[in-house]
Image (tube, grey):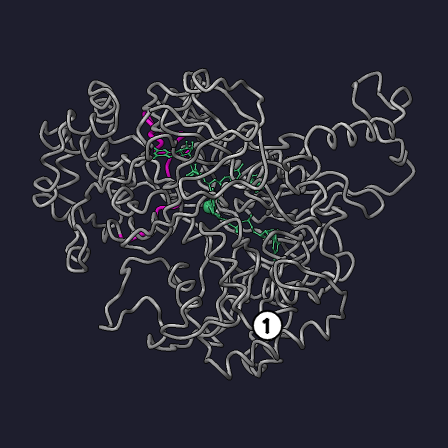
Amino acid sequence: MAFNLTRRRFLQSASLAAASIPLSKVVSAETGFVQSPLEPKGSLKEETATGGICEMCFWRCQLIGKKRDGRLIKLEGNPKSIDNGTSICARGNAGIKLLYDPDRLKYPLKNVGERGKPVWKRISWEEALEECSSKLKGVVDKYGPQGIAVFPHGSTAKYPMHFFERTVGTHNVSEASFFQCRGIRDTAYWATIGKAPGENVDMPNSKAIMLLGSHIGENVHVSHVKSFIKGLQNGSKLIVVDPRYSAAAAKSDVWVKIKPGTDTAFLLAIMNYLVKTEKYDVDFIDEWADGFDEFAEGIADWTFEKAAKECNIPVEQIKEVADILADNAPNVSIHPGRHVSWYGNDFQRQRSLACLTALLGAYYVEGGWVPGIKPKVGKVSWAKHDHGDEHNLNYNEDEELRHPFTPPGTPTELIRDAALTGKPYPIKGCVIWGQNPIQTIPGQEKMKDVLRQMDFVMCVDVMPTDATMWADILLPEASYLERFDLVKTGTQWDFSEKHQQYITARMPLVEPMFERKDNVFITNAIAKGMGHEEEIPVKTVEEMVEKNLAVAGLSIAQLKKEDGIHLRDGKDPYGIPEDFEVLLYNEDIEDAGFPGVPTYMPVEPPPAGFARLLYGRVPVHTFNRTQNNAWLNFAMPENPVWINDETANKLGLKDGDIVGLVNSEGFKSRTTTTVKVTPGIRKDSVYMAHGYGSANPLLSVAVNAGVDDTSLMTKIAIDPETGAHGMRNNFVKLIKDGKVLDIPA
Ligand SMILES: Nc1nc2c(c(=O)[nH]1)N[C@H]1C(S)=C(S)[C@@H](COP(=O)(O)OP(=O)(O)OC[C@H]3O[C@@H](n4cnc5c(=O)[nH]c(N)nc54)[C@H](O)[C@@H]3O)O[C@H]1N2
Ligand SMILES: Nc1nc2c(c(=O)[nH]1)N[C@H]1C(S)=C(S)[C@@H](COP(=O)(O)OP(=O)(O)OC[C@H]3O[C@@H](n4cnc5c(=O)[nH]c(N)nc54)[C@H](O)[C@@H]3O)O[C@H]1N2
Ligand code: SF4
Ligand SMILES: [Mo]
């Protein structure tokens, strides 16, 4: 809630809502549910549409839609799915409310005001696309292709991203899913086992599961949650390492209430113990691992005592965890994590997780790390060209890589610094597609400065957001329920059941409304306008899907006949492939100037009077993108700040008190939220759900609801090996009734 706009507005809207429903008439006697008096009765045409794929988050559960007279009235899991089955989560259900959200983008818009303070004018698609292509071509002509920066995310963003990267030729593409999410995990595992790990842990068949930060249950990916629950039902032990009593911690055998930022020390002590006591899998290491001696020597100092002090946890607890893992090896799931851009020391922690999995012999065995074997489909997109590395910002003057273990694309901070300094070259054109760089990337004011200095900013989204306020041209995309786009493949999640694979493609459940268009239409028109008509790989999005399906001998028509999902026999995923290798010590990392054996790098502690700001997910929202959804806002309208109960007592704070926040660099939150007083968080930290506190007034439900965690991340940390962001190095105090409260030590 905004300062000064708190209870009154809420009460007003609540009484209005109550006044509009004549309750006595519509409460069903049998169910007690309130029915809308507008709901049509019986006579209208009902049908079920199949082939939907959810994108309320990026897990892509398979859907069917119940329709009445052409209008989608309910979403359900596709009964044929071997992934989510008939289940979908709260956000998946609420997709209907995104589809019909009256605030959604409907027409192409031109900003005739300022960036950041837009005044929107409706324009035609012809005019909008002409403007985008001529302005972007202008940037390329004046500054070269490297003058364009792209901030993409989501299934439709790949096609335009490939166009700008492969065809136009800019390296300056920064995906939120890499540089603010899982990129560090992927490259750290690449540097250890030669593969990105996904979340491929065989939890249903585990004897012990260890989650480091991953708060499964609040982090909701339906089939992943199912496989976690099945593991627990099957009797797996659960170790949860988290400074906060998360939903997963509530199910754990051991909750390690670790000091934030010290996880690597914890892991090193466990590994040193396994090595010293020979409780590691000697046969596995002999056969599959390289660099054991350097590794053992490099971690030799890490006693339980040393780690316990660093991590602020009991010595006995580290030993307890190490013994649970050793006793249950190799059938243990060491979860690789997903959002891992935490502190700017994260590559080494992710390497530690990969090495620990090896010491336990837990690759490709029941209950361990096991990638399912997926069917092959096509990947039609823009043809790859080599544009050289001359304009790759990741190379320094001596032609050395600044961040040698970077995920694909260019680290966000390198792009922003170049844009702001004009060195080594200016960046003057910006394409934002399915990303919200204002609320996703630390350094919000810096991002605004970057966008301010652009010659042209275009944005493709489904909703108005805090990022779309910075566009010159804003284009409305058809939502995931109204379009074709990706082909998705996978396997069943419990490998002890029969082996099966699936292939599905996202198909529209309803026709696009208003003037919304798909990614291929938009990208091709811009490509044509920029002079790249010859290189266009497909004419329509359906053609792309058909070509990708054809590689697997399928077609859209065939998938429709099969209720949206094609199933085929799968393969046994257990058993180590012959070319598998684990690099416990990696010489390349050392040659690049970083520790080749996993190494702990301490992070800055909170200054006196401040607590560390931690954040995470809540089951009913996905980042910022679901905030305006009426059902989901109803389920969780703001993001209470978790504060330790003893600390709260000292400060005189009670559950539900309204507070603002100020960080150690003096930045004050624009809005307020409530306090959640709990023993379930350490005294040195506070915690809040990410994604709240939208500033865009066109979001009639979400505007000013809760506090924007990203706005408080003014201090920016960079993980040196990868260039990805660390986001948990900001420190805050609470403000109540205008008074700033010092957090007691
Ligand atoms: N409902 C819902 N589900 C989602 C999403 C969503 O937006 N909504 N987003 C999806 C996406 S894209 C991702 S990447 C995943 C992310 O999901 P995860 O990878 O599970 O989430 P994180 O945000 O990394 O983890 C947050 C947890 O880390 C803890 N934590 C904070 N600091 C530390 C520390 O120093 N050490 C340890 N051990 N723990 C710490 C926090 O207390 C919190 O419980 O969730 C996915 N699932
Ligand atoms: N402070 C903070 N920052 C974080 C995180 C955090 O926990 N805290 N989490 C990090 C993680 S794990 C991730 S993955 C990133 C995610 O970062 P983003 O990808 O920026 O997050 P979203 O909120 O999904 O924003 C995506 C935008 O896509 C739009 N959108 C939704 N559907 C469509 C569509 O079909 N087409 C188009 N064109 N647009 C669409 C939404 O309206 C929204 O504006 O954020 C990272 N940043
Ligand atoms: S986990 Fe929920 S939001 Fe994500 S794809 Fe599945 S149903 Fe949709
Ligand atoms: Mo993510």
Asked if the stretch drawn in magenta spans residue 741, the answer is no
Image quarter hosting the N terminus: top right
Q: Is residue 715 visible?
A: yes
Q: Is residue 378 visible?
A: no
* Residue at (9% x, 36% y) in the render: 300
Residue 409: percent from left, percent from top = 40, 63
Depicted 221 relative to depicted 241: above or below: below
Asked if the stretch drawn in magenta spans residue 199, the answer is yes
* Residue at (62% x, 31% y) in the render: 636
Image quarter hosting the C terminus: top left
Say whether mark 1 is within 8 Å of ligand 2: no
> In the figure, is residue 233 to the left or right of 120?
left
> In the figure, is residue 51 to the left or right of 742?
right
User: Over which residues does the magenta segment extend?
Assistant: 194-214
- Check disc 1 and give the amino acid type: Val
Please tell me in which quadrant of the rendered image residue 15 appears.
top right
Question: What residue does disc 1 label?
Answer: 538
Residue 335: percent from left, percent from top = 35, 36
